[in-house]
Structures are given as C-alpha cells and as structure tokens.
C-alpha cells in the first residue's frame, strides 16, 4: 500500500460475552478479565477470520516469519488474536508473534457508562455527531482515540518493513483507525512532495472534525476481517 511499509489487515474481535450480555466494557481493568472474553460463537468467528487471512497470505510472496499480530490487551481481543494465530500456524507452519499494545485498547466511554447497557451507545453517537473532538463525560473522544491509534501505526511502521500485520482491536477503535489512516494516505498522495512514507504530520493533519465525523462509515461486524485502506 502506497505510503505504508507493510500490508495491514484489521480484525474486530469475535462476538464476546459483553456483546451477548449487552454490556459496555471499556475500562482496561474490566476488559482484561477472563469473564469478559469471547463467547463460543466469537471463537468460531475468530477461527473463520484466521482461515480467511490464511487464504489471503497464500497469494503473497511474504515469508511466514514476517507475519505479525498486534492486539488490544482486552481478553476478547487477546483470545481472538490467539485463535487466529493458531489457525495460521497450521497453515503457515510458523506461529505469528502476538504483541499487545495499549494504544489499540477499547475506546473508554467514561465511568457513568462502564458496565451499563448497550442501549446507551446512541448517546455516545449523538455526542460524536455534534463534535468528535469532545467525548462522553470522563471518557475518550474520537480525537483522543485517533491520536493513540496513530501512534500505534507509526510504532509498527518503525519496527517492521515488508511484512503482513494483523491488528486485532475493537469496533470504535478500528473504525477510527481506518478513518484516520485513509485520510492521511489521501493527504500524502495529494501533497506530492518530500517523503512518500506516512508520517505523524499526515496523521495529525487527518485528526480534524471533517474527517473524524465520518468514522462510523468504517464500522465492522464482530469477527470481521478487512484490509486497511
């Protein structure tokens, strides 16, 4: 992909116990608990995503040793990443490394919404629609998440080159990541000068209201695998 040193895929975690119970679990100390991991159907979704990715990798001339997984530390994402890695090991003969990155964690929706019903999500979407630079009380705004996922991409780009990278994360986090990277790459293409590699300048330029207000256009279903564009 022009502007990036690696080929990226994003994967939203499989259906989780919080999904099935209709709970918002966005605080790190809650999210890492095993009780908020994958539901049985989510394990199957993760395995299916692994098989899809394995088929994608068959057509790429990339060494199995150059396939890496970066994941949110939450139990639902680490379990998804592990399921994918197990499938890829049987296909590639080598198990990809899994690195946990706090920058890829779930968007924190604030203390008043933590462990509350999913029925509160429309309240968050309404706040986002008014101003993506402002978050729910005590929680993260779209812009807050955009800054940390931008750092995640830049960190991975500084470590790897010519590899396949799978990012396993959460719905809001991944749709914000896609929004920012997509806009930053367009920015890079239109600038047409200097380096042709994505930089913090391009990413920071994409963290603005007109761009971030589009983040829900990049929504993923649970267990959905997508190439990062």
Image (tube, rainbow, N blue to C red):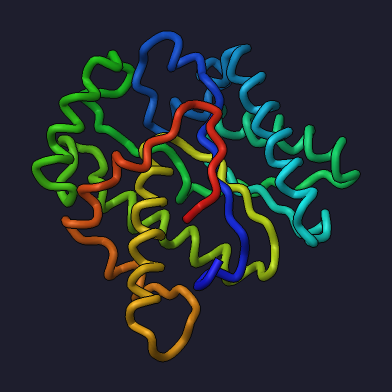
For the image shown, how many numbered marks are present on the structure?
Answer: 0
> Left or right: 192 with respect to 112?
right
Residue 172 placement: quadrant: top left
Position above or below: 128 against 70: above
Name the spot of residue 28 as percent of width and height, x first.
43, 34
Up-down relation of residue 56 to residue 18 (above or below): below
Residue at the image point whose x is 38% and y is 85% from the top: 192
Q: x, y percentage for residue 141?
A: 23, 45
Say which of 193 and 122 sits in front: 193
User: Does residue 79 appear left or right of residue 220 in this picture?
Assistant: right
Q: Give the residue drawn at x 45%, y 36%.
A: 170
Location of residue 162 (image quadrant)? bottom right
Residue positioned 12% across, 47% down in the render: 131
Q: Nearer the viewer, residue 159 or 88?
A: 88
Give the position of the N terminus as an image quadrant.
bottom right
Residue under the image location 41 percent in, 51 percent down: 178
Is residue 81 rendered to the left or right of residue 51? left
Which residue is at the front of the view, 74 or 200? Answer: 200
181 to the left or right of 118: right
Instruction: Work out which residue is located at the far top of the displayed protein and give it.
Output: 21
Residue furthest front as drawn: 59
Q: Find the residue positioned furthest to the left.
A: 130
Percent coordinates x, y for residue 124 in the rendering: 19, 31
Residue 39 to residue 216: above or below? above
Q: Is residue 13 above or below residue 162?
A: above
Residue farthest to the bottom?
194
Q: Position of residue 37 (x, y in %)?
A: 56, 21
């Amino acid at each position: 992909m022009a502007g990036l040193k690696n080929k990226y895929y994003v994967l939203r975690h499989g259906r989780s116990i919080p999904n099935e119970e209709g709970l918002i679990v966005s605080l790190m100390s809650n999210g890492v608990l095993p009780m908020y991991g994958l539901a049985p159907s989510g394990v199957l979704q993760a395995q299916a995503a692994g098989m899809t990715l394995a088929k994608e990798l068959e057509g790429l001339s990339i060494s199995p040793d150059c396939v890496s997984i970066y994941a949110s530390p939450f139990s639902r994402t680490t379990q998804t990443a592990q399921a994918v890695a197990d499938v890829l090991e049987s296909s590639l003969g080598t198990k990809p490394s899994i690195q946990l990155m706090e920058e890829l964690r779930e968007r924190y929706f604030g203390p008043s919404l933590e462990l509350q019903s999913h029925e509160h999500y429309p309240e968050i979407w309404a706040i986002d629609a008014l101003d993506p630079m402002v978050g729910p009380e005590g929680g993260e705004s779209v812009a807050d998440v955009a800054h940390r996922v931008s750092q995640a991409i830049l960190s991975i780009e500084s470590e790897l080159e010519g590899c396949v990278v799978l990012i396993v994360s959460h719905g809001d986090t991944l749709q914000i990541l896609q929004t920012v990277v997509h806009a930053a790459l367009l920015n890079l293409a239109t600038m047409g000068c200097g380096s042709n590699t994505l930089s913090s300048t391009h990413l920071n330029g994409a963290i603005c209201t007109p761009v971030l207000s589009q983040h829900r256009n990049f929504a993923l279903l649970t267990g959905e695998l997508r190439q990062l564009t």
